[in-house]
């Protein structure tokens, strides 16, 4: 499992301490994109949908497409295709049709959408991102884990090899599920604490790896009031 570390680190020059790692750069905070492409093994371009959702601002998808067009010249760079949190699957599929950069992007399946949509995306794309939303906005709650178990059980029952799923903001739970990659902002947020160092934090996260197989697990039904 690849850990994509948020590159929005302050002070900015300390980003070089993540040389040789995998980095995520958000369109909402694009400043680190140049240096990230100079030092990282690979770069993930985040569409900034979470920041848009939290701020209530209007998304600039045309600007994001143009930004991606430049940086997708790098063969190890890929992007998260625009999505709108809590907008429903029809809105998400409409955005997929507008995406101009083919399979250098990965669509997002939100956990409140039907699992059938996740299966369809898996069949159509080499990578699929998984995002917390709807009834499951907070990573790591009991209900969130039940939904994630349901999704992986459904995938496993199809047989064959597991797909590459990317867990959005799921670095802290990535070791529990066979993700291909996850991202997180722990280093960006907490590297200035006295007990932390960027190099040490990156080493600990990158060493956190899941079992690469998924054994079908019992599913606890949600309680109905």
Image (cartoon, grey):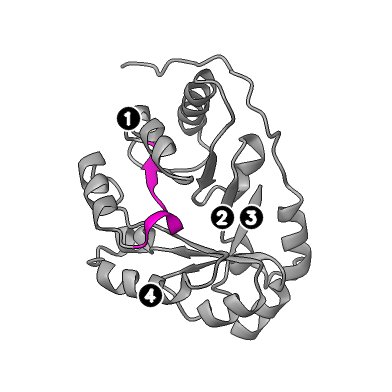
Q: Which residue is drawn at 52% across and 18% down?
A: 157
Quadrant of the image occupied by residue 188: bottom right
Answer left or right for 197 relative to 151. Answer: right
Quadrant of the image occupied by residue 39: bottom right
Q: What element carries label 2?
A: strand
The answer to which of 145 and 192 lies nearer the viewer is 145
Question: Which numbered disc, 3 or 1, marks the residue that appears first in the sequence?
Answer: 3
Q: Please, is residue 148 above or below residue 45 in the view?
A: above
Q: Is mark 1 on a helix, strand or loop?
A: loop
Neighbour tally class for label 1: few under 14, some 14-19, many 20 plus, Cα within 10 Å: few
Question: Which numbered disc, 2 or 1, marks the residue that appears first in the sequence?
Answer: 1
Q: Which residue is drawn at 32% across and 30% down?
A: 114
Q: Distance between the residues labelled 3 and 2?
A: 6 Å
Q: Which residue position holds label 2? A: 183
The image position of residue 11, as x and y in percent, is 61, 83
Q: Which residue position holds label 1? A: 114
Query: Which disc is residue 67 wearing?
Result: 4
Magenta stretch in the rendered image: 101-111
Question: Which numbered disc, 4 or 3, marks the residue that appears first in the sequence?
Answer: 3
The image position of residue 162, as x and y in percent, is 57, 32
Question: Which numbered disc, 3 or 2, marks the residue that appears first in the sequence?
Answer: 3
Q: Nearer the viewer, mark 1 or mark 4?
A: 4
Q: Is mark 3 on a helix, strand or loop?
A: strand
Q: Which residue position holds label 3? A: 3
Neighbour tally class for label 3: few under 14, some 14-19, many 20 plus, Cα within 10 Å: many
The image position of residue 130, as x and y in percent, is 45, 43
């Amino acid at each position: 499992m690849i850990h994509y570390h948020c590159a929005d680190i302050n002070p900015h020059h300390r980003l070089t301490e993540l040389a040789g790692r995998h980095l995520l750069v958000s369109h909402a905070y694009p400043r680190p994109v140049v240096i990230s492409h100079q030092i990282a093994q690979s770069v993930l371009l985040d569409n900034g949908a979470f920041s848009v959702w939290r701020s209530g601002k209007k998304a600039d998808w045309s600007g994001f497409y143009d930004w991606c067009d430049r940086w997708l010249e790098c063969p190890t760079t890929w992007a998260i295709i625009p999505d709108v949190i809590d907008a429903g699957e029809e809105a998400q599929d409409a955005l997929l049709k507008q995406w101009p950069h083919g399979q250098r992007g990965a669509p997002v399946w939100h956990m409140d959408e039907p699992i059938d949509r996740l299966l369809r995306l898996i069949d159509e794309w080499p990578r699929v991102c998984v995002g917390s939303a709807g009834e499951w906005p907070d990573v790591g709650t009991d209900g969130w884990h039940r939904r994630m178990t349901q999704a992986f059980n459904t995938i496993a029952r199809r047989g064959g090899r597991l797909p590459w799923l990317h867990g959005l903001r799921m670095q802290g739970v990535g070791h529990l599920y066979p993700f291909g990659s996850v991202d997180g902002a722990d280093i960006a947020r907490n590297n200035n604490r006295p007990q932390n160092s960027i190099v040490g934090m990156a080493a600990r996260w990158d060493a956190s790896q899941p079992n690469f197989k998924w054994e079908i697990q019992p599913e606890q039904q949600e309680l109905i009031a």
